[in-house]
Image (spheres, rainbow, N blue to C red):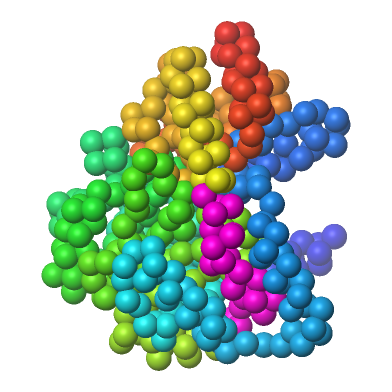
Amino acid sequence: MIQSFLVSANMSDRLAKRTERISPFYVMELLRRAKQLETDDRDVIHMEIGEPDFPTPQLIIDAGIEHIQTGNVKYTAAAGLPELREKIAGFYRQRYGIAVSAERIFVTPGASGAFLLALGISVNPGEQLLLTDPCYPCNSNFIRLFDGEAGLIPVDAATGYQLTAELIKQHWTPATKGAVIASPSNPAGTLIDREVLKQTIAAVNALDGCFYSDEIYHGLVYGGNACSAIEFSDNVFVINSFSKYFGMTGWRIGWLIVPDKFVEAAEKLAQNIFIATSTHSQYAALAAFDQRTLAELELRRAEFEARRNFLYENLLRLGFDIPVKPDGAFYMYANCSGFTDDSYQFAMDFLETEAVAITPGKDFGVNDASHYIRFAYTTSIDRIALAMQRLERFINKG
């Protein structure tokens, strides 16, 4: 027993110190409990995870299967299939009217891989990157993984939960290396204004910093268009993914656009940490840009918009405050202070009593987090309607 304890203690001492700075993802505890309830035959409605409920488009599946069936599933170049990089470059020409060299495009294992690659070639220990609070938690943890500092800036409805040039200048310090924006954002689903984006990039460039643009929800925008950071400067890192708009979450494939001066470093690091992104996923992704696939994805986008409108109206009806109606993604960030001062406990109790899984605000930062809940409208309107019935019953009991 004593020997076992000593071994355990010694192993704990060997943990890398950086792991102590990585915050947990609280929604995973909710998901774990939701799965347990499902094994007990409870009908759980999932509104916690940011994963489209639509299947991968069939043309994409067929392309992946076709390549697997050749049996020639070998490594690709570390930066990705040349033809896929060209396809992505063509997508920017067609959708944004921007010419991007394929040499600057790196195919990665999801957007997470893109972030890790971008930060690995640009952030030194002790350097700080500015982010919004609230924001997607993994982005802060990625920075800490490289022994950098996440400088969280409280934002609210006044700026659409986005950074501005003024906020960046106000919070910039000698240790600051750059700034990260996400548009559409998670958890608020807001778009950064075109002129504001242009100004934030100019501010960071003037301070000789790095600008990182998380654009993984591009395509899932309602009533307007998202603009890419690459429209305003070549001196930016652009992170995107096939997961959300293209419906390829489990295929684990994304991409990163880097400034010219980072191309060689990105190639070298990708060779070492990834070897290559999954080959069959890359061949499947070639079909993502087929016009038939894009037409199907636009129908799905319209369905997400209908879900957004339905959820928005019902949450307001029930007494939730939604300071900004989402412009994109598939999230609703709702103020629940009319019902609770502890959104985490609210979410846990709601799951236990009504079998609806939602995400508490503490997953996205500390800025008034106890008063906010994120609802993901990644399930059908019929299921959302049932969730709203259960929510109304739950709050009326309280």
Q: Residue at x 61, y 47 (%)?
A: 52
Provide the major secondary structure of the magenta segment.
helix
Residue 368 magenta-highlighted:
no
Q: Residue at x 41, y 42 (%)?
A: 222
How many numbered discs, if any? 0
Tell me if 178 is positioned left or right of 335 in this view.
left
Q: Quadrant of residue 53?
A: top right
Q: Nearer the viewer, residue 233 or 395?
A: 233
Tell me if 94 is positioned left or right of 359 in this view.
left
Residue 266 placed where, x, y %? Answer: 44, 84
- Where is 324 relative to 115, above or below? above
- Where is 261 relative to 378, above or below? below
Residue 188 placed where, x, y %? Answer: 41, 40
Q: Is residue 71 visible?
A: yes
Q: Write the start and end of the magenta stretch as one range.
A: 273-298
- Where is 193 relative to 173, above or below? above
Q: Nearer the viewer, residue 260 or 55?
A: 55
Residue 382 placed where, x, y %? Answer: 66, 26
Residue 89 placed where, x, y %? Answer: 42, 76
Q: Nearer the viewer, residue 326 or 398?
A: 326
- Where is 359 relative to 65, above or below? above
Q: Quadrant of residue 224?
A: top left
Q: Nearer the viewer, residue 119 or 20?
A: 119
Quarter of the figure with the C terminus? top right
